[in-house]
Every structure is written in structure tokens, then in C-alpha cells.
Image: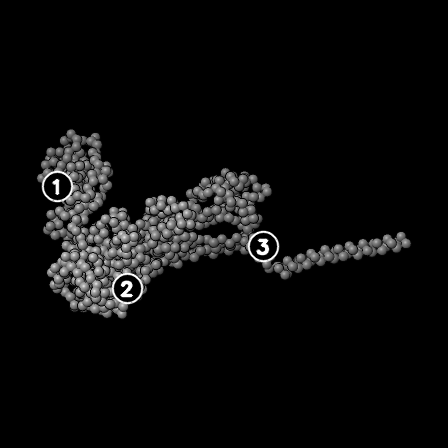
Amino acid sequence: MARNANTVFRKRSFTALAILIIFGFGSSLIGLINVGLVHGSQYKQKAEAEQMSDNKISAQRGTITDRNGNVMAISADAYKVYIDPKAINDKESKINARTLANQLASLLKMDPEEVYEMTQKKHSRYKVVKTKVPHSTKVRIEKLIDDNRKNGYREAIGFEEDVVRYYPYSNLASTVIGLSNSGRGSSGLEYYYNDILSGVPGRSISTKNARQEDTYSGMSSYHAVKEGENLQLTLDNVIQYYLDSALSSGVKRFNASYGYGIVMDVKTGAILAMSSQPDFNCNEPYKIQDEEKESEIKSIANKKQRQKAESDQLFAQWRNRTVADSYEPGSVFKCITAAAGIEEGVVTPSEMFTCTGSIAVAGQIYHCSNRAGHGAEDFTHSLMNSCNPIYIQVAQRIGAKTFSKYFDAFGMSEMTGVDLPAEAKPRAGVTYYTADSMGPVQLASSSFGQTFQVSPIQVCTAINAIANDGKLMQPYIVGKWMNRAGDSVHVTKPVMKRQVVSKQTARTVGEMMEQVVIGGTAKNAYVPGYRIAGKTGTSEKLSIKNKKLYIGSFCGFAPVDDPQITCLIVIDEPHGATTGGKTAAPIAAEVIQNTLRYLNVEPEYNDKESQNLDVRTPNVVDVDRKAAEASLKTKGFQCKIIGSGKKVIRQNPAPGKLIPKNGIVVLYTSPNAKTQRVKVPNLTGLSFAQAKAVANAAGLNVESTGQSSSVGASYSQSIPAGSSVAVGSVVTVSYVSSDPEMEIEDTGNAD
């Protein structure tokens, strides 16, 4: 019995063991089948994904230069800094995460807590700490790694190639150039030409071991980067500087909200300079430039409201208002009305009119800015005086249908097609009247530039057509783009859109516009030696909190006999002076004068201008002091001697420098004589005679720009009051006419 029992027990044990073995191997077999056959491809992909490293290699954006090759935007090599959180938190690691985070944060100028949080992503093998790190910082981090090699920093910290965008001129033309984020343009030319500038990123694919090192398994591949192409603009950095600085000073002087301006090549439509002020620093695009507004925003207690105010301010300083904004052009548009009237033969420059101070149109009373009326005046003088009633009469002769034809022909009802983003789009029936919707009242107000809106680039392009013998050109800002070898890929050719008016009509209107500068509302745009044609505008904006706000503008071209440049200046919401003649015209004079000189357009002075020309200082160095003094006085200069020596050692101003007639020349006769310095007096708010007397009393020379006649008043000086300068230095003082100027536009039924 016992033997049978043992036999039964052994059989049952073998059976149980067999069942266990079958189930054990069976479950393993099922697991293998599940892993290998059912989900094999899925697990294979997961394993390869953990072993594969697929890195994007950023392409360098193309370089942007001005027309002379000066670099305005360029990409430079940089690096991404990343960490391996798993290596930092490994049980065998000697790394103190807090210490590493503090050290990296110090070198990368980051918040240590932010870096520490990255180190705590314990299941991650790759976490980018910062992008666009310069080479100098990479070198310091590499030293940190070497110094902590024994602590495992080499396994925890790594680098990848990256690129950084740099703008050498910071604010210069910033609203035109725009900005880029993460390798993509987000505004301005960076955005508009992004596909050309950005190129094609590369890829580096390789297998990695557990230490994130390349295994060289043969599975690696590399897709080369295609670098972006380069843009050469039509902008000229020198002219751009003239425009930026003059416009920025004007906005501050008149406490204006904004200022914008354009300088255009007459013959081609190429943009030589374009500015919107205030602007921003392309290298610090998220920094608010206006310190006062930045302080106001920081004082907002509500976080959401503060963030919105900050965002609104940033977008405002990035905005290229010369293209994206629209405004009522005011009396500048009278040049278009005059061209249409002369081309259609309904008026001539010498035709006589009578201005009584107002005119009635379909029950609406339109006043002239001179409420007493200008009396008898010819058509040329009506432009010089900016006389609204006369232009209403001319528009009535032209008729709504024909008026609209010229409105369209001069490009006012279409986008200019300039190669910049966000150009304001005209909308029929919204921003302007069509022929069908233009009744007598709409025709009257449109004749002098009110009740419709156009962009600054449209106005500049239209006036440029008058300068260009009636040819309307399409404006453009990129002259060509090239590959990295410097070969031209595309060259922009000037595009004439149409002949708007005849050459004779254009030149006739140009001569009328010259008279506006010589003796009309634009006389503050006058520059001695250059024939300038132009027209001012002063349009009233909608009232805000019972305050009347205006836009003052000027648009013109020079020289009249062979136009080279067209210049538009707009001052938005100026305070104090409001008219275009007082606000925009002096700025235009400064820009036009500097630009023409830079372009080597020689001035041609008339007899009156020649009498006031500056003269060059003669060279009296090494000449006997008495002979030098006598020579200077004979030539009309004032002389001041410093030192007790017998010969002139040096002089100020230096030989050959331009100074006003009867200016002061300081002679130093002792080798050890120190340069005598004086504080510059306040020379603003004075007539030229007064400014000269004050400057001379201080031992300084003064030269003038603008209207420096007996009715002129100085509004700025080249060297700030209180500055310390050498005796004999020249201070340039700018003038505007102090004549009362009546040019405010009237949209009807004004008191």
C-alpha cells in the first residue's frame, strides 16, 4: 500500500511540475510572441527612438545690407546649452543639482531656480537650458565642465550649434528691417523676405549609447544646411541717419505722438530712407524705448492690464507707420488737384481768382484758413497761400468723374505694391469716395485733402510722379538678393506703372510748388543754394476729449530743374506749433539739405544767398602773430590771441574750415597754452542778429539754417546749451519763420 501511495504521489508531483513548466514556458512564449511578432515593430521603433539622436541644425539667415554694402542684419554662430537631467540625478552621480544650476545660471544670466527646475526632470535625457549662447559664454561653460570633470559635469552638460541674429546699427531703420524670432522673421523685411533669408535647416541623425555618445553604428546620416540668401537694400545708411535723427528730434521738439518720413529716388521709386519715430532697438526688441511710458506701464497694478499695455506699446514701436497707417493728407493733396485741373485745361497757373474767405457748397460753408479772404490772387498764389475756396472751384470745374479718374491714376485708390508687409489697403466707400458716391460736398472736401485717408507711402509716390515728369513709379526697397558666393539671384528693375499727367503739366505744377517754398506756406523748407518744390498740409483729426489734434506734413522734391529726391515728413499730433509749415517743413529742409550735399548735388546760390555764404578760414599757422592778426582782419575775420609767443602755433577753427563771414578765429602763440573753453549759451528763440551777438560775446561762431531773416526765430542749436567747447567753435542754429501761418484745413460749416 505504501509503495502504491508513493507511486501515486510521484506521478502527481511530476504532473504538477509538468503543468508548471508548460505554463511557465507558455507564458514566456506568449510574451515573446507578443513582443516579437504582435508588437515587434512598435517596440523596435521605441528602442530606436531612445537610441537615435535627431538634431535640427539651424541655417544662418541671409545678411541684409544697405545699398553700399553696410551690414544692417547678420547671423553669427552661437550655441544651444543643454543638460542631461537623468545623469545629474543618477544614484552614482556626484553632481549637486543645486550647485550646478547656480553655476550655469550665473554664466547664462538666468534665474537659478529656473535652471534647477530643469535639472529635476529626472526621466529626461535632454533639456535645452538656453539658445543663442555666444561663443565667449560657451568657452566659460567649457571651463566649468573641465574644472568639474571628476564630478561628472562632462556627462551632464552639452552643446549644439545654433545661430544668433545681430543688428550692428541697433535702431537705424529698425521699423523697416523688423525682427526675427527663432529663425523666422516676424516683422518688417525680416518677415516679408523670410523665405529668401531663412534658407533650409539641416539635420544630423545618429545613434547614441546610454551615455549619449555617438556609437558609429553606420546608421548616422547628415543633411546639409542650405544657408539663406543675402538682401541688398536701396536704403542708404547715411541718408537714413539724416532722416532718423531729424525726425526723432522733431517728434521730441513738438511733443508729438509719432513722426514718419520717406526719402525716395525720383527716377526709379527706390526708397533711400524710411523712418517711423519713436522706433526700437532691433537687438532689444522687447525693451520699451520710451522710459516714461515704460514707467507708466510698470505702475499698473492689474497684471492682465499691465501685460496688455506692455504688448500694445511693443507693437506700437515695431509698427512701420509710413506703410501701415493712413491719414488725411490735407493741403499736400492740392498738388494733385492742381495737376488734374491743368492737365484737363480747366485752369492755368496765371488765371485770376477772388478769395472772399469762404465758399458755399450744397448748404455747406467752407472757410479759407484766412477768414478775411486773400482777395484777388492767381492760381499759383492760391497754392502758395493754401487757399481752400479756390481749390473747391477748380474741383467743381473738373467734375466728380474726372476728379476720381486722377485720384485713381495717382495711385490713391490702390496699394503701391512696395515690398514691405502690412501695407494699408484702400477701401472704396470707406477710406475714399468713388465717382458714384462723390457728391458736391464730398468733391469739395476731397479737393484739399480732407474726408479721405491714404498712407504716407501713397502720398510720397504720388508727389514723386509730379517730380518724375508725370511717371508714377512703384516704390521698392530691396535692390537685389544674392547667394552666399555673392552672385546675383534677382535684381529689382524699376517699374513705371503709368503716365499720370504730361511732362509739361508735371513741370508746371513743380514750378508752382517751388513758389510755395520761396514765399508760401512751405518757406521753412527753403535751403540756400537749392531749388526746392513742396507743399505743406495741416489736417484736423477727430476731436479726443474736446481737444483738437492735427497732423502737420510736408512733401516735396529737389532740385526743381533736375529732381533727384522726393521727401515726405509727417508729424502726428504735434503740440505748440501745429501747422505743416512750422512742424514738418523745417525737418524736411534739414533732411533735403544733408541728402543733396551727400549726393554731391552742388548748390547754386543767387546773388542774395552769395552775400551770406560761409567762408573758409585761412591758414596762418607759423605766421608772425602781428602779421597773422592783420591778415585776418583785412579779410573780415575777428581775431583773438591766446599766449605770448611771436608766432602762431595753432588756430581754431582749423585752416580750411567753413565759418560765417566776420567770424572769430582764435590764435594760440605759446606751445604750452591750454585750449581755452567756454560754455555754449542758449541760442534758441532768437533772431539771427541776436543769436550772432550772444555767440560772439562768448567767443563762438554761429551759422544758420532755415529762415534766418529778421522774421525768423531760432528753434534748435547743433551743440546743446551748457556744453563746454573750444573758443572759436561753430554752432549751427536752425530757424523757422515767425510769420503767422494760416493753413488749418476746414471740412465745412466751421465757425
Scheme of image coloration:
one colour
Q: Looking at the image, is mark 3 or mark 1 nearer the viewer? A: 1
Residues tagged 3 and 1 counted as in contact (Cβ below 8 A): no
Measured as percent of width and height from the top left, residue 237 is found at: 29, 51
Q: Nearer the viewer, residue 708 or 537?
A: 537
What residue type is disc 2 on? Tyr
Of helix, strand and loop, which one carries label 2? Answer: loop
Of the residues under marks 2 and 1, which one precedes in the sequence? 2
Measured as percent of width and height from the top left, residue 45 is found at: 57, 57
Residue at figure coordinates x 13%, y 58% from the top left: 374
Q: Nearer the viewer, residue 412 or 53?
A: 412
Q: What is the C-alpha distance between the residues marked 2 and 1?
A: 56 Å
Residue at figure coordinates x 24%, y 65% from the top left: 442
Q: Looking at the image, is mark 2 or mark 1 nearer the viewer? A: 2
Which residue in the structure is indicated by mark 1?
Answer: 662
Measured as percent of width and height from the top left, residue 616 is found at: 15, 43
Which residue in the structure is indicated by mark 2?
Answer: 432
